[in-house]
């Protein structure tokens, strides 16, 4: 039996993701792509374009805007949507905004619950989406490691880890029960390293915050925060110091820690990331808020 | 935390690092920007009964062989076992719900990069109630590590797992006989268990099956050869794992493309999108649609990165054909000289995963590669007896049973036998009402529907008639191409071609 050259790992992962996109598009009535502007979303969007080529992406993108994203992220989002001619829906939890829920005066868990989890549920319900693509990876965190590719949610968007549907081979069974919806994770089997290697290989544009530059920072609880606007009041003890920093993950600026780095181009970012000995969630302040934080958020309907 | 313990725990980069040959240090910067990553990728399932020490073994593999983040290491070092040792199992037990109960409910996926190789560890629950999750994991595995406790040996759950591995096509299996320290590293005890394992190996057609005595807590025969069990001269667990070929390897086989959907582009472009489950396809090749019996030639293999000349198993592609076959999701394109089969009746070996037993009155769908077909009747013929490993006749089927079932479908669909083509021979049963996946398994027998030959004859005659009406010269390449396709199909349908 003759054997041809093995397909590269990134090619295997890319093909699997495309397969997942197509399975979901074929089986669900009204899917949406959860676009969060970061590197994972960038890869997700690129794979979606490949999956339906030469056709346009047959579903809209949804961005849950907490109103606290870095300005660079919003600019990148709008430019991407314009350049690729995407159907982009931006949703803000207006009730939360009216109540003044913000990440500075409120506990991160409460803020996230209102401005992200609740906002997501609102948007999914309002548009009656039955499937939402997300960029979550199983290597990110313990409860993610247990997630299916088609991850079912009850009518209240809850995840039931005790009764996940068997998911055998690449037979993705998308038949929904009454009131059920599904989260679809095409990047399930990618690692952070794969995402960066792919960004590099496919020459994808990413938000400039991923690259090191001198930015105004403060140090708080041992973490470096980059001040993106003047909404955070500082005690006298905190001095604004320009530091050369970049981000491993992006989110709401008061909740996202930067790392000091000299990596100012993609190649050096990738090299630095793959040599890193800490996990990327170190930079996400919300995950350290309480034990099993991510699992709890997921049970309540967080992505 | 104690620095001594860190040293005792064999930091990565040591002798036992998971890697084929002498690849680079895990995560070495030199490897970082090799744009494509490397090609090596294997999926390893771990399974065992409750308390076999499986989480500890995986934790040990991660600890010894992986690019484990330092914050994860630090977190583990914060909570040591009462006797001061590292609790490796804490690296894998994910859910709070699981920690509360002290059991693993669902499979956890872990990614270990070591040199050029990526190991995807699929850790499956031992608890009998959650065997369905083990089956989910098994369907994705290239190799399985079955764990037994040296004190208890091969148990009923071990045999069930072996049966599921056999059913789902996992052919490479390692039996890790764990907790050898608790039987004093006794060789006779190991040989006894190994003999029981050999019976399973023979029954479920495992190839390259090895039994290895290990001690997960100390790492004996995991990453390094045991000094406590010098009588064992075989490979360590990691050495045995490293003999598994990468899943990116493409074997020569007949072409299959289950159609996922069709895509449209500028002007008349109508593409057929899907993932190749078997074989290869090149521009100019002829493909057969089993359902209509019609053939077409591949004009383009389109991707966003440009057209391909040839594509292989595992690639997700879009085919543009030289004529519209009018096919949609659920169809399978095959190589005309070794086509898939069009059937309404089949036999399948199934693992029953639903909590509720089989109910012949329940409305079901059969899900093949991309087709969802109503089932008109299902009968259970036999079930596997886990004690004798033989099949016994029965018409009933309950949670966790491995059964032989015969199915009649509401309409024909395109399938293969699982032993020939995994991608088009794997099936699941779906509850029509709730959408739940009730059972999964493999097609073992296909019954060609009566009258298929004549149907094929009528269809292919129609194709020829259409070619004549289209004004094709009988001497033209296009006409000959169609006629050849027709002859192939007639032969397959058992029709005497000269007479036809």
Image: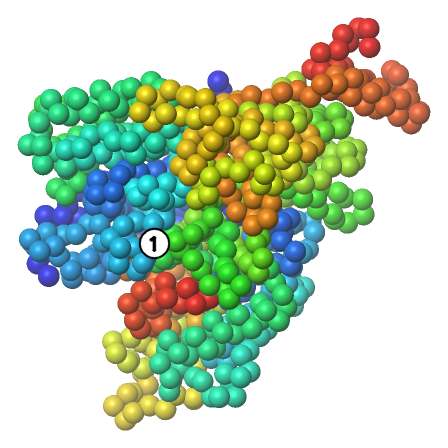
Q: Is residue B224 above or below residue A178?
A: above
The residue pinned by badge 1 equals A274
Quadrant containing the C terminus of chain B is top right
Which x, y percent locates residue A98? Answer: 52, 88
Which x, y percent locates residue A112? Answer: 42, 75
Q: Quadrant of residue B424?
A: top right
Q: Nearer the viewer, residue A188 or A157?
A: A157
Quadrant containing the N terminus of chain B is bottom left
Q: Is residue B288 above or below residue A288?
A: above
Q: Is residue A218 above or below residue B343?
A: below
Q: Residue at x 36, y 63 (%)?
A: A295
Residue B484 visible to the viewer: no
Q: Residue at x 34, y 27 (%)?
A: B386
Residue B401 visible to the viewer: yes
Looking at the rendered structure, the secondary structure element under dot 1 is: helix
- State left or right for residue B481 relative to residue B346: right
Which x, y percent locates residue B126? Answer: 30, 42
- Color style of the picture: rainbow
- State left or right for residue A185 relative to residue B109: right
Q: Circle 1 marks a residue in which chain? A: A
Q: Quadrant of residue A127?
A: bottom right
């Amino acid at each position: 039996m003759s054997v041809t050259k093995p397909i590269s790992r990134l090619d295997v992962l890319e093909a699997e993701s495309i397969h997942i996109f197509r399975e979901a598009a074929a089986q669900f009535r009204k899917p949406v792509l959860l676009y969060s502007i970061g590197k994972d979303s960038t890869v997700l969007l690129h794979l979606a374009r490949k999956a339906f080529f030469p056709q346009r992406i047959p579903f809209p993108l949804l961005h849950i805007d907490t109103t606290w994203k870095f300005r660079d992220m919003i600019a990148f989002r709008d430019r991407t949507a314009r350049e690729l001619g995407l159907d982009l829906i931006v949703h803000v939890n207006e009730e939360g905004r009216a109540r003044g829920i913000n990440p500075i005066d409120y506990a991160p868990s409460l803020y996230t619950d209102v401005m992200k989890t609740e906002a997501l549920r609102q948007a999914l319900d309002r548009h009656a989406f039955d499937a939402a693509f997300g960029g979550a990876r199983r290597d990110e965190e313990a409860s993610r490691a247990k997630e299916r590719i088609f991850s079912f949610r009850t009518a209240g968007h809850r995840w039931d880890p005790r009764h996940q549907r068997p998911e055998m081979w690449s037979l993705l069974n998308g038949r929904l029960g009454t009131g059920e919806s599904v989260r679809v994770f095409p990047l399930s089997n990618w690692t952070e390293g794969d995402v960066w290697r792919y960004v590099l290989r496919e020459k994808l544009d990413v938000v400039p915050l991923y690259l090191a530059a001198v930015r105004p920072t403060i140090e708080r609880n041992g973490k470096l925060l980059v001040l993106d606007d003047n909404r955070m009041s500082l005690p006298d003890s905190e001095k604004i110091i320009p530091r050369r920093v970049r981000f491993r993950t992006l989110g709401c600026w008061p909740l996202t820690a930067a790392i000091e780095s000299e990596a100012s181009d993609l190649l050096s970012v990738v090299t630095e990331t793959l040599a890193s000995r800490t996990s990327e969630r170190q930079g996400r302040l919300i995950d350290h808020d309480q034990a099993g934080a991510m699992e709890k958020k997921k049970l309540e309907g967080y992505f | 935390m104690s620095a001594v313990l860190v040293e005792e725990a064999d930091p990565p980069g040591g002798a036992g690092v998971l890697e084929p040959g002498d690849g680079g240090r895990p995560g070495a910067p030199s490897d970082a920007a090799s744009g494509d990553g490397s090609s090596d990728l294997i999926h390893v399932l771990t399974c065992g009964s409750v308390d076999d020490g499986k989480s500890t073994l995986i934790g040990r593999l991660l600890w010894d062989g992986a690019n484990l983040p330092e914050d994860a290491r630090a977190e583990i070092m914060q909570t040591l076992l009462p006797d001061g040792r590292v609790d490796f199992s804490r690296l894998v037990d994910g859910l709070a719900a699981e920690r509360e109960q002290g059991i693993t409910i669902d499979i956890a996926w872990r990614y270990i990069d070591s040199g050029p190789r990526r190991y995807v560890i699929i850790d499956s629950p031992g608890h009998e109630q959650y065997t369905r999750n083990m089956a989910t994991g098994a369907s994705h595995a290239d190799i399985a590590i079955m764990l037994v406790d040296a004190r208890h040996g091969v148990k009923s759950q071990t045999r069930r797992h072996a049966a599921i591995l056999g059913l789902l096509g996992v052919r490479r299996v390692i039996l890790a006989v764990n907790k050898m320290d608790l039987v004093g590293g006794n060789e006779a005890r190991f040989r006894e268990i190994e003999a029981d394992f050999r019976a399973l190996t023979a029954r479920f057609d495992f190839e390259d099956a090895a039994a290895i005595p290990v001690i997960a807590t100390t790492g004996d025969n995991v990453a390094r050869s045991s000094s406590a069990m010098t009588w064992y001269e075989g490979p360590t667990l990691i050495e045995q794992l490293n003999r598994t070929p990468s899943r990116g390897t493409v074997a020569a086989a007949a072409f299959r493309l289950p159609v996922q959907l069709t895509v449209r582009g500028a002007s008349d472009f109508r593409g057929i999108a899907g993932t190749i489950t078997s074989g290869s396809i090149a521009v100019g090749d002829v493909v057969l649609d089993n359902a209509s019996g019609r053939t077409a030639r591949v004009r383009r293999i389109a991707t966003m990165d440009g057209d391909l000349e040839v594509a292989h198993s595992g690639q997700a592609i879009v085919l543009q054909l030289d004529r519209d076959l009018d096919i949609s999701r659920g169809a399978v394109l095959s190589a005309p000289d070794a086509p898939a089969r069009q059937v309404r009746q089949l036999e399948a070996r199934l693992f029953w995963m639903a909590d509720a037993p089989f109910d012949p009155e329940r409305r079901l769908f059969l899900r093949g590669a991309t087709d969802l077909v109503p089932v008109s009747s299902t009968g259970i013929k036999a079930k596997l007896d886990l004690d004798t490993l033989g099949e016994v006749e029965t018409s009933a089927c309950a949670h966790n049973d491995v059964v032989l079932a015969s199915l009649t479908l509401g309409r024909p669909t395109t399938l293969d036998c699982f032993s020939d083509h995994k991608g088009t021979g794997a099936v699941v049963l779906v509850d029509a009402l709730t959408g739940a996946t009730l059972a999964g398994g493999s097609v073992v027998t296909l019954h060609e529907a009566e009258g298929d030959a004549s149907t094929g004859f009528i269809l292919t005659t129609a194709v020829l008639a259409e070619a004549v009406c289209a004004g094709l010269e009988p001497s033209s390449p296009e006409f000959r191409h169609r006629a050849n396709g027709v002859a192939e199909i007639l032969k397959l349908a058992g029709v005497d071609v000269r007479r036809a």
